[in-house]
Amino acid sequence: MVYGFETQKRNIDEGPILQGFPVSPGRVTAPASVILTPGDFEKMMPDTILVCPTIIPAWTPLLAHGKGLVTDIGGVAAHGSIVAREYGIPAVLGTGNGRERIVSGQRVTVDGVDGTVTLAV
């Protein structure tokens, strides 16, 4: 167990802005693809922002078609952070409840410098 290493922010279930960890710089606005399990991989639409619980190596191919990344759990050293930086896409990890607040097709803005995800209403 690692002590003092935060991997999740606490966001309340209201308001249009989620806070997370800024792990890959840039800013992008696009529709979201919410992917919860490997069985949902075919639901990942090209040029969307991948929203998921976390990223493990098996999920890496999804980022090749994505414009950004939002996860519930993760930090600067997480696999998703490393891959997002390699692909040059903005990423905010550790939002805590992003997959519960964002629906597929909803436009979101990922700011990988400020660590915010802004939901369109």
Image (cartoon, helix red, strand yellow):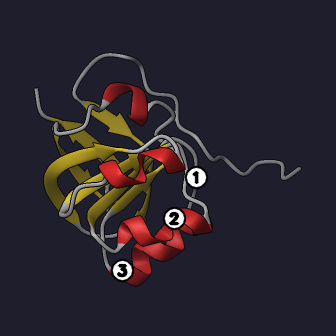
Q: Residues within 10 Å of mark 1 (few under 14, many from 20)?
A: many
Q: Which quadrant holds residue 85?
A: bottom left
Q: Nearer the viewer, mark 3 or mark 1?
A: 3
Q: Position of residue 19 (x, y in %)?
A: 39, 39
Look at 36% across and 57% down and name the residue there: 69
Give the Cα distance between marks 1 and 2. Answer: 8 Å
Of the two numbered discs 2 and 3 on the same chain, state the one appearing first in sequence.
Answer: 2
Do labels 3 and 1 touch, CB within 8 Å?
A: no
The type of residue carrying mark 2 is Gly
Amino acid type, label 1:
Gly
User: Is residue 83 something that shows in the picture?
Assistant: yes
Q: Nearer the viewer, residue 51 or 77?
A: 51
Residue 60 lies, in percent from the top left, at 49, 69
Q: Residue at x 62, y 47 (%)?
A: 7
Q: Secondary structure at mark 3?
A: helix
Distance Cα–Cα, label 3 vs label 1: 17 Å
Q: Residue at x 34, y 74 (%)?
A: 64
Which residue bears the numbered disc 1?
74
Query: Crowdedness of circle 3 by 10 Å Cα count: few (<14), some, many (20+)?
Result: some
Left or right: 106 as drawn, with respect to 68: left
- Residue labelled with disc 3: 87
Total marks shown come to 3
**Is 88 or 2 nearer to us in this picture?**
88
The image's mark for residue 65 is none
Amino acid type at mark 3: Tyr
SS label for mark 1:
loop
Where is 85 relative to 30, above or below? Answer: below
Q: CA distance from mark 2 to mark 3?
A: 10 Å
| Marker disc for residue 80 | 2
Q: Which residue is at 76% across, 48% downward?
A: 4
Between 55 and 15, the one lying in front of the other is 55
